[in-house]
Image (cartoon, rainbow, N blue to C red):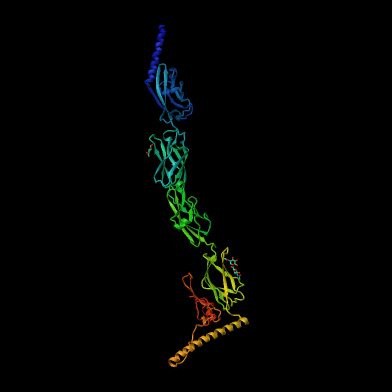
Amino acid sequence: MEIGWMRNQRQRQVLVFFVLLSMSGARAELGPYSVVEETERGSFVANLGKDLGLGLTEMSTRGARIISQGNKEHLQLKVQTGDLLINEKLDREELCGPIEPCLLHFQVLMEKPLEIFQAELRVKDINDHSPVFTEREMILKIPENSPLGNAFPLSNALDLDVGSNNVQNYKISPNSHFRVLTRNRSDGRKYPELVLDKELDREEEPEISLTLTALDGGSPPRYGTAQVRIEVVDSNDNAPEFGQPLYKAHIPENSPIGSLVVIVSASDLDSGINGKISYTLFQPSEDTSKTLKVNPMTGEIRLRKQVDFETVQSYEVDIKATDGGGLSGKCTLLLQVVDVNDNPPAVTMSALTSPIPENSPEIVVAVFSVSDPDSGENGKTISSIQDDLPFLLKPSVKNFYTLVTKRALDREERAEYNITITITDMGSPRLKTQHNITLLVSDVNDNAPDPLTVYLVIALAAVSSLFLFSVLAFIAVRLCRRSRAASLGRCSVPEGHFPGHLVDVTGTGTLSQSYQYEVCLTGGTGTNEFKFLKPILPNIQAQDPGRNSEENPSLRNSFGFNFQ
Ligand SMILES: *[C@@H]1O[C@H](CO)[C@@H](O)[C@H](O)[C@H]1NC(C)=O
Ligand SMILES: *[C@@H]1O[C@H](CO)[C@@H](O)[C@H](O)[C@H]1NC(C)=O
Ligand SMILES: *[C@@H]1O[C@H](CO)[C@@H](O)[C@H](O)[C@H]1NC(C)=O
């Protein structure tokens, strides 16, 4: 019992000593030893016997053994020789991670007598890992027109190796915009930074793809790569531009409201809102804004109100394209209105003689003018009357016509003529206007009366003459008597003088009429208004119509009209 206690007590003492010894650190130090990681199993590290100054067999007799940290059998001791060997391949990265130096602590324990030696094995790094980017693709959004020298940090690559075997350098694939700098982080790691060397233009190159390479310091260096995609962010650096500076368009007048005139189109190199274009009419005149409208989204220009060639023949207006960033561009629209034959000719009667005295030579019975507001062929006119009538249409000055008799008319043959003046324009389709006039033929006493009438007329004339003579004789006798009584003087009968052309030569109560007129036009003003029409009474015989028309056919025509 006593002995048992004593033994227990002694064991406890040994244990306490052992614990104290291990806690107090090495009583003696061995090493340091070092081995390169990944060295094959069984490789020699050191001869501990030699290092401890022990004889060849002493290691074995003293019961030497290795105590490893955490009971890992990284090393083995050949007690016969005292050689310390690698028991298993050592992976520095697994054992120490990023910690450098990587030290494995172990003890050499001698049991007889008890002795402990502290030792450490340094596991040296070899370059057995390549740099790896955790982000295999990096996307960078960089505004175009960023200032030169701007730096854009990128994610670094990781390398399990340490020291110079870790990442030392970054490189970027050749490009014209960026270079890469290798920067030090506070923890010693190195990270890449892109530096802008040449301005970015999204419109030229919206996206740039680069290969980033991380290199470690091994020999030869190991490397890892990642893709860097740079998306150039738009800034509103482009104004909208029209496909053409001038748009020419034609549209027939009276095209329906809403008719498409033209589609203008501008483009803007910027993207998003900076490239979104809206169209407006730029400072349109009141006329234009009433006539044209533009679709702000599509650039379609359509008719708002109708166009009328006779009112406005062309429109010129600027169209503005504005992008979402407020930049704008302009173009000009030249719109020609094309005439359509939409106006029939019009007739204006200037003078009309009716009734026409029968038996007159060729005379003018009507003067009229023709107008058509359309232009070109649409405004050219042809005038005609029925061809079975004894009348002729003759063109006169400008757009005037005269209607003349072909020959002397005979009231007894036909007393009334319905004349249809037809005016047709040359447009397509042809438009026609008709104007109806009725001409009466007045009677002139050109027929011999029947015998009974002749006798009656003679008798009436005789009676009238006799009566007149009697009255005159009576007055004469009375006057002679009175003067004879006064002074025995002479006797006279008064003579009457009457203008021949006003005498009622027929005795039927009609006066002979002059049918020659002077037409006065306000020449040269372009209005061709009829000013007045006055009869030229005295000179029917004095004028030779044929000769006058030869002298000046256009101004004094054969029908006795003087155009002044
Ligand atoms: C980064 O650190 C290395 C040493 O690790 C040093 O030689 C170099 O000058 C440093 N570079 C910068 C930019 O600080
Ligand atoms: C002329 O027209 C009128 C009606 O406008 C008609 O009464 C007359 O008979 C016509 N005269 C001739 C000769 O056709
Ligand atoms: C003119 O007279 C013609 C023939 O009588 C007739 O057909 C036409 O309708 C008339 N035109 C007008 C405008 O009165």
160 relative to 239, above or below: above
Does residue 244 show up? no
Quadrant of the image where one finds ligand 3: bottom right
> Is 371 or 497 nearer to us in this picture?
497
222 relative to 464, above or below: above
Does residue 185 show up? yes
174 relative to 486, above or below: above
Q: Quadrant of residue 392?
A: bottom right
**Extreme residue in the bottom direction:** 488
**Spot occupied by residue 532 in the image (x, y as percentages of width and height):** 48, 73
Quadrant of the frame with the N terminus = top left
> Is 455 or 242 nearer to us in this picture?
455
Is 500 displayed left or right of 110 in the figure? right
**Extreme residue in the right direction:** 451
Q: How many marks?
A: 0
Is 29 displayed left or right of 541 in the figure? left
562 relative to 486, above or below: above
> Is 195 or 457 nearer to us in this picture?
457
* Residue appearing at x 50%, y 86% in the figure: 472
**Spot occupied by residue 528 in the image (x, y as percentages of width and height):** 49, 70
* Residue appearing at x 41%, y 11% in the figure: 8
> Is 538 or 388 nearer to us in this picture?
538
**Spot occupied by residue 6 in the image (x, y as percentages of width and height):** 40, 9
